[in-house]
């Protein structure tokens, strides 16, 4: 015998192995002529006790001799036998044993019989094991493959043969790479070699299993493998169990995709972002190319018409196929799919369209519109179109292509795409509705905020207003610059709790109230007290209305109100739950005055306190809402430090400083509205202000006119002398008649001429209609006709009646009225 000799060791589990079975030899008469050690151990008889005696007399229980005789007859007839018979042990026990008998010599009648035996229980277990092994190869639905140590195939069962597409008898001796694509074969080879090397089994490992004969068909299998060893531990090879789990794998992938879609689609209330998120989920998990087209009104937040679909705007595209840009319209382009096209029918019928296999340009023309040739060039072979519909509205459609993936779309893919589209459509419709409401609130807010700030002699101003990001929505922050009498100015910032149309509307009502209160020339703390009452009433109204119109919006606000006088350089401030302003001196030192905080507006009944301080010319006041220091990503102290750094550069223009503050402190999409108002103070020079105190006597009006005329001459305003004399005469005369104390006359030359007459009385003058028989009552009417504005403000020690006259034109003179107004000036 040439070549190496291979030795196989017996398995100890085999009950009929030479090493483990009981053995005996019978002659042709049934006399025991041989007895093995294992037989002695099994039945208890020594060799000298049984050799030479009939086996039936010694080894067979008396009651079973007929049964054993039948088995012996069958054995002689067939020249061999296998089965279970009862045996009599030396101690009298009846023991069922499994017996295998074979004829040793054929020369009759001298033939002998060689018997091997084992306990029946061991034999039944062994037979069960053999039946299981036989079932695995012949009847099991799970694939089984046995490999030699070099991974050549030794044996496979029928399921493996079906998976491989090769008859079972032809697979023996082949390698995995002979029928799987190289990538998949290499994966399986590496894993099986690891099992051979380590002995660690592989359990339920899923992997791709594409056949060389059909590489386009994706198949997934679950593989378990274990190393085979003989009784001495020598490696005999590896066995793998293979189950086709393609459908289960696809179902799991679809579920994972749906879960991913739920997490990734609709993270914002922005139509374009939602469309883009849909493409990110679909490619490459489901399709190689995808496009999302929305009806034109949808992107603007409007409700699309369902009677006749207009053009669609491409909202998002994504592709992993080279050259797809020649086939897909670019984002933002307007596309008109006619009603006769598949896209048009998909939307009109609100029904998905599946083209599993596109046949040539003719088939592509039906799905690629006029770009059929380009689609053919990049290999498009399967297409799906799914409508985007939510709440009874068709919003657009999604088109999916396959070009690089060889497998065509199937019905399951269409169902999955429909799930994606349904989720995305609801999110897009939510974003559309929000866009509409957000735009309406933003438009309302923009209309409620000041369009342009006036050019005032008291301050130079700049402002920035930054709406919150789309998720937070429009808020109720506002700012204002209100001219007051005496060249003074009111600076206001406020913040209404909440977001949306309700907050914007409340902001508008508060801003209107501030203007009204400012016209009354109230002190800052009085203005806040009146606003507090207003917000408290608004909250009560809202609570009453919520019974019919449920609303979670809470009415409340904060406000900072400051008044600056450019003549005295005095700034008076009061705040209601609002951040204090930043004050920057002309040399760049920044501070945040510790003002009394005051309660937020709407609590009702709590007092407010004002603080006064002087500001040098060129000082900077920075008023802001809390969004500026709370939407930065820093803590408040760090934000205030950054704000101070940007404000400290006093050489920069105000508008640039405002922009730098916003760019430095705020992210691209702040979480709250931000209002910033910067005011650099001015001071009216002493030569532009003239003040006189007049005694309360009959000649006060005459003296006032003389002083006035001289001052206007000094200022070069002689043409305004006569009209101004009329105004001052009336005001001084009224003060003399009704106040009874000293009268103060002040002239201020600014963009307009301001006349102020102050007295110690708190009685308010009022305009009335005089009858033809009345001797008086026409003075204030005349004042109102000759001035741009006039009014009364109250101080701690009386009142001031003020007027403003434009210096652009000179009103007509009325010489006959002067004598009638100064009849007390004798």
Image (tube, rainbow, N blue to C red):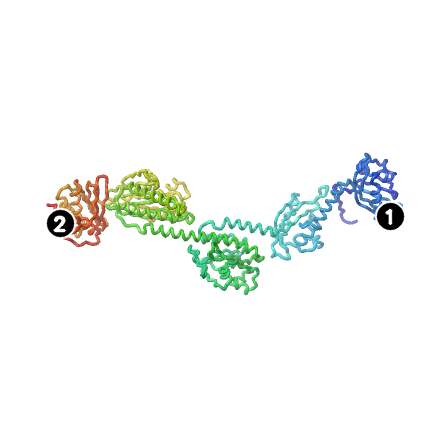
Most distant residue in the front direction = 548
> Residue 745: x percent and y percent?
18, 44
Callout 1 crowding tier (Cα within 10 Å): few <14, some 14–19, many ≥20 = few
Disc number at residue 106?
1
Q: Is residue 628 visible?
A: no
Left or right, 21 with respect to 225, comes to right
Q: CA distance from mark 1 to mark 2?
A: 166 Å
| SS type, badge 2 | helix
Point out the frontmost of discs 1 and 2.
Answer: 2
* Image quadrant assignment for residue 123: top right
* Image quadrant assignment for residue 82: top right
Closer to the camera in the image, 248 or 314: 248
| SS type, badge 1 | loop
Most distant residue in the right direction = 109
> Residue 639: x percent and y percent?
38, 42
Residue contact at pointers 1 and 2, CB within 8 angstroms: no
> Residue 297: x percent and y percent?
43, 57
Closer to the camera in the image, 630 or 227: 630
> Residue 702: x percent and y percent?
13, 46
Q: How many marks?
A: 2
Disc number at residue 820?
2
Left or right, 237 with respect to 443, comes to right
Callout 2 crowding tier (Cα within 10 Å): few <14, some 14–19, many ≥20 = few
Q: Is residue 575 visible?
A: yes
* Image quadrant assignment for residue 577: top left
Q: Quadrant of the C terminus?
A: top left
Left or right, 325 with respect to 151, comes to left
Most distant residue in the left direction = 826
Left or right, 752 with respect to 660, comes to left
Most distant residue in the bottom direction = 362
């Amino acid at each position: 015998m040439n070549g190496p000799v291979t030795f196989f060791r017996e398995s100890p589990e085999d009950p009929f192995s030479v090493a483990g079975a009981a053995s005996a030899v019978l002659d042709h008469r049934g006399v025991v002529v041989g007895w093995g050690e294992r037989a002695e151990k099994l039945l208890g008889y020594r060799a000298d006790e049984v050799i030479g005696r009939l086996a039936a007399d010694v080894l067979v229980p008396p009651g079973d001799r007929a049964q054993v005789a039948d088995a012996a007859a069958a054995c002689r007839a067939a020249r061999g036998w296998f089965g279970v018979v009862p045996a009599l042990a030396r101690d009298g026990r009846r023991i069922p044993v499994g017996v295998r008998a074979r004829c040793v010599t054929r020369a009759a009648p001298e033939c002998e019989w060689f018997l091997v035996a084992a306990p029946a229980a061991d034999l039944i277990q062994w037979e069960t094991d053999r039946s299981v092994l036989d079932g695995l190869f012949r009847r099991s639905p799970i694939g089984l493959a046995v490999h030699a140590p070099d991974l050549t195939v030794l044996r496979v069962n029928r399921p493996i043969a079906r998976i491989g597409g090769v008859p079972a008898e032809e697979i023996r001796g082949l390698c995995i790479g002979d029928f799987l694509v190289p990538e998949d074969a290499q994966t399986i080879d590496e894993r099986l070699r690891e099992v051979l090397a380590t002995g660690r089994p592989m359990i339920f490992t899923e992997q791709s299993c594409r056949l060389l004969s059909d590489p386009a068909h994706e198949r997934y299998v679950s593989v378990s493998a274990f190393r085979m060893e003989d009784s001495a531990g020598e490696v005999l090879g590896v066995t793998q169990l293979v189950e086709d789990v393609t459908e289960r794998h696809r179902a799991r992938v679809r579920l994972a995709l749906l879960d991913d879609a739920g997490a990734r689609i609709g993270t914002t209330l922005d139509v374009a972002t939602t469309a883009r998120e849909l493409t990110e989920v679909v490619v490459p998990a489901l399709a190689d190319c995808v496009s999302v087209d929305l009806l034109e009104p949808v992107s603007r937040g409007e409700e699309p018409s369902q009677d006749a679909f207009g053009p669609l705007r491409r909202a998002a595209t994504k592709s992993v196929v080279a050259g797809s840009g020649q086939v897909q319209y670019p984002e933002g382009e307007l596309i008109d799919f006619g009603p006769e096209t598949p896209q048009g029918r998909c939307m009109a019928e609100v029904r998905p369209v599946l083209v599993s296999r596109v046949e040539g340009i003719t088939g592509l023309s039906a799905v690629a519109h006029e770009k059929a040739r380009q689609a053919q060039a990049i290999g498009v072979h399967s297409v799906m179109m799914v409508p985007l519909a939510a709440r009874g509205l068709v919003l657009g459609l999604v088109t999916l292509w396959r070009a690089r993936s060889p497998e065509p779309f199937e019905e399951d893919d269409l169902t999955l795409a429909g799930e994606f589209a349904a989720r995305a459509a609801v999110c897009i419709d939510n974003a559309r509705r929000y866009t509409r409401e957000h735009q309406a609130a933003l438009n309302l807010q923009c209309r409620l905020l000041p369009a342009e700030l006036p050019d005032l002699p008291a301050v130079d101003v700049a402002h920035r207003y930054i709406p919150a990001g789309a998720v937070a929505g429009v808020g109720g922050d506002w700012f204002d610059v209100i001219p007051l009498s005496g060249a003074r100015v009111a600076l206001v910032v406020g913040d209404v709790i909440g977001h949306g149309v309700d907050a914007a509307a409340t902001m508008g009502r508060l801003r209107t109230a501030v203007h009204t209160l400012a016209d009354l020339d109230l002190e800052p703390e009085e203005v806040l007290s009146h606003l507090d009452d207003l917000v408290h009433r608004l909250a009560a109204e809202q609570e009453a209305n919520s019974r019919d119109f449920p609303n979670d919006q809470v009415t409340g606000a904060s406000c900072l109100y400051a008044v600056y006088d450019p003549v005295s350089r005095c700034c008076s401030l009061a705040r209601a739950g609002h951040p204090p302003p930043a004050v920057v001196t002309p040399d760049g030192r920044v501070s945040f005055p510790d003002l009394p905080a005051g309660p937020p507006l709407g609590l009702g009944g709590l007092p407010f306190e004002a603080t006064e301080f002087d500001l040098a010319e060129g000082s900077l006041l920075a008023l802001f809402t809390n969004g500026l220091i709370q939407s930065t990503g820093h803590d408040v102290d760090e934000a205030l430090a950054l704000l101070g750094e940007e404000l400290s550069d006093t050489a920069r223009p105000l508008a640039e400083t405002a922009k730098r503050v916003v760019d430095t402190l705020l992210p691209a999409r702040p979480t709250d509205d931000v209002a910033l108002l910067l005011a650099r103070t001015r001071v009216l020079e002493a030569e532009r202000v003239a003040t006189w105190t007049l005694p309360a006597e009959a000649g006060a009006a005459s003296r006032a006119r003389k002083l006035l005329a001289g001052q206007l001459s000094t200022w070069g305003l002689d043409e305004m002398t006569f009209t101004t004399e009329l105004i001052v005469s009336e005001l001084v005369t009224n003060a003399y008649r009704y106040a009874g104390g000293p009268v103060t006359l002040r002239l201020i030359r600014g963009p307009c001429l301001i006349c102020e007459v102050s007295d110690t009385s708190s009685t308010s003058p009022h305009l009335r209609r005089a009858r033809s028989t009345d001797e008086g009552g026409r003075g204030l009417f005349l004042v109102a006709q000759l001035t741009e504005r006039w009014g009364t403000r109250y101080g701690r020690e009386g009142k001031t009646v003020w007027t403003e006259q434009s210096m652009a034109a000179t009103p007509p003179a009325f010489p006959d009225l002067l004598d009638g107004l100064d009849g007390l000036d004798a």
